[in-house]
Amino acid sequence: TGIKILLTSLSAMVAETSTFPIDLTKTRLQLHGESQPLSRPTNSFRVAAGIVRDQGVSGLYKGLSPAISRHLFYTPIRIVGYENLRNLVADGSLSLSSKALVGGISGAIAQFVASPADLVKVRMQADGRLINKGLQPRYKGLFDAFNKIVAMEGLGGLWKGVLPNVQRAFLVNMGELACYDHAKRFVINNQISDDNIYAHTLASIMSGLSATMLSCPADVVKTRMMNQAASKEGNVMYKSSYDCLVKTVKIEGLTALWKGFFPTWARLGPWQFFFWVSYEKFRQISGLSSF
């Protein structure tokens, strides 16, 4: 288990670093129109180009440190937890629905633990919008963000938006882990490919797409809930996840729940590829069996 935890952390760092600019674009796109519903429509390419224009290429990696920190907790818990729960069944033959449930539970637990790092990541990614307006960012770095959030919002402030965060993680992992596991075995058992990079790639593409479809609405709500900070009077834009969901649909329409779908899928697909190919290879090198 210790080796698996180390290997999942290394694989997650590879995947996160490789795909982080897409995640940043997705976050900015999801926040677009939040305070100005009638603002000019945009897309992921305009958002990414604007970041590079205003902040340089390094601006695409704003918030990378908390993202890496998050995955040191999140990914080992969900991946190793899923595998251990799955292997509790003697013959290992779980149905797709059972795998989905196990994946969802593993993801929810992992996200609850990692939620503070995720909140800091979202806040630091969103800070780029303040820089674009000529304002000072709220946080200077990872530790400064943690200190300021605890000082101004209390320890519980680190878990702001934890409910939509956990809901999203349940849906993501329900689609991602179950689909990857099931798809890989389908590809191998039907002799489409051996247990190699081709099987891992096919399975990761399918898992990324299913995870995006299921999780995008919860991801939009999570991003908006985690980004908001109370004013001096204690007022907030959204009182709860449900309030955020209702206001988003009422003001911006139902399709707003899938804002950032393309960059979300464009990130999840490559993220899945980098993670699973790296993880399966690391397991092979370490003498472990395939996932």
Image (tube, helix red, strand yellow):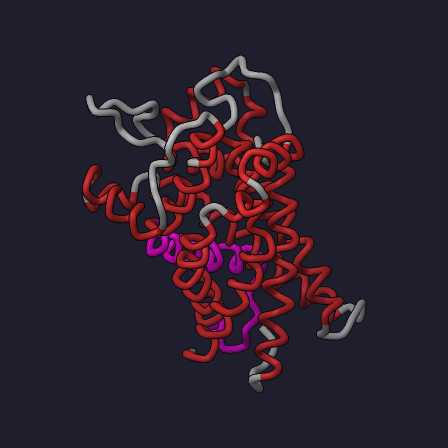
At x 47%, y 59%, the residue is 102
- Main secondary structure type of the part rendered in magenta: helix
> Along the horizontal axis of the image, is 290 left or right of 151?
right
Which x, y percent locates residue 111? 39, 53
Asked whether residue 212 appears in the rendered view, the answer is no
Q: Nearer the viewer, residue 122 or 83?
A: 122
* Residue at the image point whose x is 36% and y is 49% from the top: 141
Q: In this rendered view, identify the residue nearer to me: 86 or 65.
A: 65
268 versus 232 height, above or below: below
- Residue 56 rendering spot, x and y as whole percentages: 57, 41
Residue 78, by quadrant, is: bottom left
- The image position of residue 61, as x and y in percent, is 52, 48
Q: Residue at x 39, y 40 (%)?
A: 123
Q: Quadrant of the N terminus?
A: bottom left
Say if the magenta span includes residue 94: yes
Quarter of the image for the C terminus: give it.
Answer: bottom right
| Res. 289 visible in picture | yes
Where does the magenta region start and end?
A: 86-115
Q: Is residue 221 above or below residue 72?
A: above
Give the image quarter of residue 54.
top right
Q: Could you tell whether 283 is left or right of 240 in the image?
A: right
